Amino acid sequence: MLDTKTLSTALILILIIGSGLHLVNWRMHRDNPGAKWWALGLCVQTCGAIATAIANASGAPFMPLLMLFNSLALGGLVMLVYGTACFSGHALPRGIYAALGVIIVAGIGWATLIEPSATARLGVFGLVQLISNSLILSRLGYIARRDGAMGVVVLAASVVSLFVLMGSLITWQLVSQPEIAGLYANSDVLVLALLTLIACKTTMIFGYLLLSSGYSQARLEQLALSDPLTNLPNRRAFERTVTQRLASVRKTDRLIALAIFDVDHFKKINDTHGHDAGDAVLRHLAHVATLAIRPQDFLARVGGEEFAAIFDVEDAAELVSATNRLRLAIEVNHARVNEAEIAVTVSVGAVLARSGAGLDFSSLYRAADQALYSAKGTGRNRVVVGEAEPVPLAA
């Protein structure tokens, strides 16, 4: 039969291994805002668990030290909560951490120094576990929306399992009311509590590692799909979005509108003001264009001084209006570089099409590029609407 001494030793070994894994994870993912706190939290928990086990093994622990060791183990759990909140990008109010600290110090202090009771300490431990895991669970939705479900499902399953099982054990203890002599007492509740912690802690350790992996994968994908100069989506992201929109409009029989705009005389800007100024102009243009389009539209830098956008419009007149609004916003907002103002204009080639079986990204982009070439050839700083498929176009 399993005994509490064997199970507590197994839990400590799992915490030691988990701490080592997370210290390595922290070193590998230093840009991960949660990795540091997960590693430190597990290390603090491990130290607290080891010290508590040693104190209980003596048979007559020095109670102030036992209080410190128990508080240390629970403090590590609070650090895991803090790390998860930081990682999610949605911080919890500081008052929550203060309240958890008060519960730990007051609860463990009372059950250790004022009215010594292993049962009461187990209750405080379970209560802090329940509150902490509820807070962790509240942040997982934000992480899933940002990085995907990898790791979130594993961690959520572990948190919910620990929540239900620990809650059931606390209820059982309160109903049955047997007094527990200590950590190594012969108690069914302690055996089940330790088994629960072993299973859930193991899953949580790997769940946090999967969160780090998901974060890194999401960041790599973001880098692969973004332009480092302007932070706009790049051509690959633009092509993916256009392809998705084409699939969508085929089902709804809607129109799709694509525009390409190019900085007029960009080489002259580089030659006159330098390439650093040219980069500053492109960043400025990206900022102005982002403000000029609507939330449902999509903007990208597709190469050099060339940008592209998808517009959600009902007809050609609305497309002309949207592209002219973009063109005018860029024209009236001069770029400021080294205290000098640089006037910037763009030529815009746009196309409006009804998605058909033969229409794909290449044909749509080619038609918009031909319209852009026409805008350049007829005086620049203007909008020309071309055709990819025969649809009625406004003048």
Image: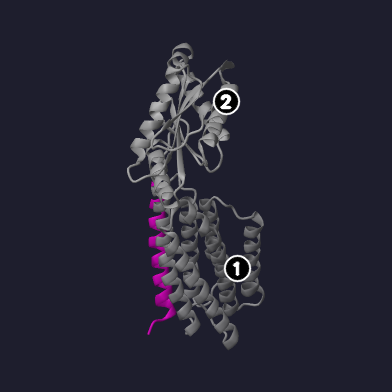
Q: Mark 2 points at which residue?
A: 328
Instruction: Pick out the residue farthest to the top.
Output: 272
The vertical placement of 302 against 201, above or below, is: above
Residue drawn at point x = 43 percent, y = 63 percent? 153
Q: Nearer the viewer, residue 99 or 7?
A: 99
The image shows residue 64 at horizontal and vertical percentages of 60, 68
The reply to whether residue 220 is visible in this rendering is no
Residue drawn where x is 37% and y is 85% of the image: 1
Badge number at residue 64: 1
Numbered disc total = 2
User: Real-space Cα distance between discs 2 and 1?
Assistant: 73 Å
- Give the class, few, some or many, for how many residues have Cα within 10 Å of label 2's Cα (few <14, many ≥20): some
In this image, 388 relative to 393: left or right?
Answer: left
Magenta stretch, overall SS = helix
- Say which amino acid is labelled 2: Leu
Residue 374 placed where, x, y %?
Answer: 42, 22
**Of marks 2 and 1, the one in the foreground:** 2
Specify the amino acid type for callout 1. Answer: Pro
- Viewer-nearest residue: 308 or 377: 377
Q: Earlier in the sequence, mark 2 or mark 1?
A: 1
In percent of width and height, residue 302 lies at 40, 32
Q: Where is residue 289 in the image (x, y as percent from the top left)?
A: 53, 31
The answer, for residue 340, to whether it is visible in the render is yes
Q: Nearer the viewer, residue 300 or 324?
A: 324
Q: Does the magenta stretch include residue 115?
A: no
Question: Left or right: where does residue 217 sit relative to residue 83?
Answer: left
Segment colored magenta = 1-28
Q: Residue at x 60, y 22 (%)?
A: 332
